Image (cartoon, rainbow, N blue to C red):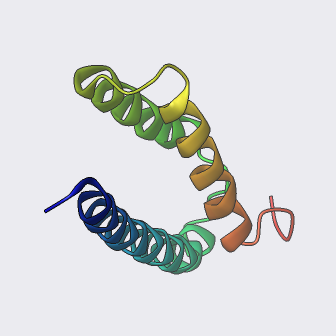
Amino acid sequence: MNAADDLAALRRALDEVDAALRAGVDHRLALARAAAGPKEHLGLPVLQPQREAEVRAAWEAHAHAAGWPPGLATRLVEALLEAGRTAQGDGDRP
């Protein structure tokens, strides 16, 4: 294999990872939407600060252990949490 072939193979692998990440986000949003019903039934607000803190901590711990670039986990998890709140109808109820 030459460098061009190596690069093409790496790009295909990255494309596969990107597809898996998109599928993971799709699944996470579906689960967030599903959580809205039980929360509403229990009289809980969409925003659950303690739960979000647990999720943030898990992402930050993983990022630190894996040597991710500073701030990456924070940006990712904040985007995911915001999308999850939106999927649950944040703003439609307390």
Task: For the N terminus, give its image quadrant.
Answer: bottom left
Residue located at (59% from left, 73% from top): 36
Residue 91 to residue 12: above or below: above
The tally of labels here is 0
The x, y position of residue 75, in whole percent, is 61, 37
Left or right, residue 4 beside residue 28: left
The x, y position of residue 33, in whole percent, is 57, 77
Residue located at (24% from left, 59% from top): 6
Residue extending farthest to the left is 1
Left or right, residue 39 beside residue 94: left
Q: Nearer the viewer, residue 54 or 59?
A: 59
Q: Which of 20 and 93 is in front in this view?
A: 20
Left or right, residue 17 beside residue 33: left
Q: In which quarter of the image is residue 92?
A: bottom right
Q: Nearer the viewer, residue 83 or 14?
A: 14
The x, y position of residue 80, in whole percent, is 58, 54
Residue 37 to residue 7: above or below: below
The x, y position of residue 70, in whole percent, is 50, 19
Residue located at (82% from left, 66% from top): 93
Residue extending farthest to the front is 2
Q: In which quarter of the image is residue 63?
A: top left
Residue located at (37% from left, 27% from top): 68
Left or right, residue 43 beside residue 13: right
Q: Nearer the viewer, residue 86 or 69?
A: 69
